[in-house]
Amino acid sequence: MSALAATKSPYEGAVDFAYSREDFQALSKLVYADAGIVMPEGKAMLIYSRLTKYLREREVTTFAEYLRLLNTDAGERRRAINALTTNHTKFFRENHHFEHFAREVRPVLVRRALGGGRVRMWSAGCSSGEEVYSLIMTLLGDDKTMGQRIAGSDIALLASDLADHVIEAGNAATYPAHVTEEMPLRLKQNWVVTNGANITMSDTVRSLVRFRQLNLLGNWPLKGMFDVIFCRNVMIYFDEQTKAKLLDRLCATLQPGGYLYIGHSERLVGPAAEYCEPVGPTIYRKHAE
């Protein structure tokens, strides 16, 4: 068998649409170019299963034909990339980060905010909003009256993600009621509204968040610097070069003395390691000038 024939052999299980190793390699390169996500060959059938519904909708019969469409239709390309991103999250995931924030960072930010200062935070790779609202609830705290005073100050949290559908979910701020089991009781009582089988984040909480679609590998139309950045479990899909570049950009947008929180299996690499120091498990503080 020739090398070309071997390359174009179909994957086992690809029964509805023609799908070859060559198709997978082209899709893998496309995902890496657009989103920095590395797709090893073990993910070949995951790509197939997530994209087949789009082939049906566009009435194409082969992945080769769909690839040609992706190269000419920017909207379809973005939809395909969205489908291939993983969005797994929950309220107060990796809770030691929120405990550190409450203990070490919140008092400083609250004093500044109530004194008329500016506080800015960023959840980069926010998924469907659970991380975002966990952070805001922690900032507002157990005392509802004080929390409402804090919310009335100059505080904002940018919540960004590559995938449009999770941005829509975060904006809706509505989740199954069982997720409240993961929340500290007082925070739930203060900042969550129960609606039958669902819960919705309170207007006070939602007023502090701005959801935006943003590709972390693209341009960042950001204004000003951030006091806190959460970028957790995003870089596990990147190669070392992409991780180093992203971390350098993230740390460059931190205020001196600001904090960066990353995922439990991630680490600081590249130039960012020179101007941020570890202060806890996967928690880093930018050197003060």
Image: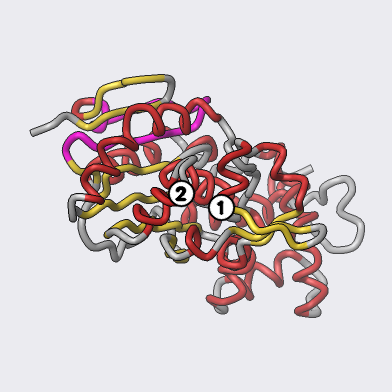
The quarter of the image holding the C terminus is top left
- Residue 97 location in percent, x, y? 46, 30
Q: What element carries label 1?
A: helix
Q: Which amino acid does label 1 sit on?
A: Trp
Q: Are marks 1 and 2 in contact (CB under 8 Å)?
A: yes
Q: Name the residue under label 2.
A: 136
Disc 1 or disc 2, which is closer to the eye? Answer: 1
- Stretch in magenta: 256-273
Q: Residue at x 47, y 33 (%)?
A: 98
Q: Which of 85 and 104 is in front in this view?
A: 104
The quarter of the image holding the N terminus is top right
Inspect the magenta stretch and tell me whether residue 270 lies in it. Answer: yes
Q: What residue type is labelled 2?
A: Ile
Instruction: From this view, report whether residue 182 is shown above or below residue 177.
Output: above
Residue placed furthest toward the front: 145
Q: Is residue 115 left or right of residue 128?
A: left
Instruction: From this view, report whether residue 7 is shown above or below residue 165.
Output: above
Inspect the magenta stretch and tell me whether residue 269 lies in it. Answer: yes
* Residue 199 seen from this side: yes
Q: Is mark 2 on a helix, strand or loop?
A: helix
Q: Which residue is drawn at 24% across and 48% down?
A: 253
Q: Which residue is drawn at 56% across and 68% down?
A: 78
Give the crowd class for mark 2: few <14, some 14-19, many >=20 residues within 10 Å.
many
Q: Name the residue under label 1.
A: 191
* Residue 82 seen from this side: no
Q: How far apart are marks 1 and 2 (CA)?
A: 9 Å
Q: Nearer the viewer, residue 224 or 216?
A: 224
Q: Nearer the viewer, residue 250 or 17?
A: 250
Q: In this view, does 189 lie to the left or right of 259?
A: right
